[in-house]
Image (cartoon, rainbow, N blue to C red):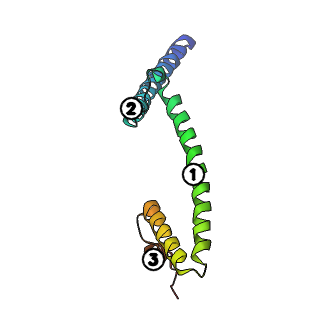
Amino acid sequence: MNHSAQLQAEYQAAFKQIQALEEMLAGLSKEARAALRGTGIWQQEFDGNEIVALIAVFRSSYQVAQQKQVALQSAIDFIGKVELTGDAEMRAHAITALEAINQILVGETIEESQEKQGIIHV
């Protein structure tokens, strides 16, 4: 094969790869657009930049989730300390609050969670 024919073949192969990548990117953009619309945060300004918008939304959501996790852990720690007090009424309220948190977070009672973790009640 002469040099010109080889270059032509390489060009055609590269062109096919570019087309395949463009199709893949278009598919990803379509999925990103659907995800943004599905969550109600689609804006016309995102058009053409759906993937970038989706990444930005993910990052900001992740940061908010981390902040909420820290706040939730502080609340759980405090409620756990209240649970250890001698006041029966406060202890009952603390246990109720911890049960509600556990149910929301993992969809099960504290006892069920402890059983899964192999924690034995004394």
Residue 71 in which image quadrant: bottom right
Q: Badge 3, how many Cα within 10 Å: few under 14, some, many 20+?
A: some
- In the depicted structure, whether residue 106 falls above or below residue 69: below
Q: Badge 1, how many Cα within 10 Å: few under 14, some, many 20+?
A: few
Q: Pinpoint residue 18: horizontal percent, then vertical percent.
A: 48, 22
Residue 3 in which image quadrant: top right
Q: Pinpoint residue 13: horizontal percent, then vertical percent.
A: 48, 22
Q: Which of marks 3 and 1 is nearer the N terminus?
A: 1
Pick the residue in front: 76 or 92.
92
* Disc 2 target residue: 37
Q: Earlier in the sequence, mark 1 or mark 2?
A: 2
Q: Pinpoint residue 116: horizontal percent, then vertical percent.
A: 46, 74
Q: Earlier in the sequence, mark 2 or mark 3?
A: 2
Spatial CA distance of label 2 from label 3 is 39 Å
Residue at the (50%, 68%) spot, across then down = 98
Q: Is mark 3 on a helix, strand or loop?
A: helix
Q: What residue type is labelled 2?
A: Arg
Residue 42 in which image quadrant: top left
Q: What residue type is labelled 3?
A: Glu
* Disc 3 target residue: 111
User: Mark 3 near mark 1, Cβ–Cβ under 8 Å?
Assistant: no
Spatial CA distance of label 1 from label 2 is 25 Å
Q: Pinpoint residue 27: horizontal percent, then vertical percent.
A: 40, 29
Q: Is mark 2 on a helix, strand or loop?
A: helix
Q: How many numbered marks have been drawn onto this rendered protein structure?
A: 3
Q: What residue type is labelled 1?
A: Lys
- In the depicted structure, whether residue 41 falls above or below residue 74: above
Residue at the (49%, 30%) spot, across then down = 51
* Disc 1 target residue: 68
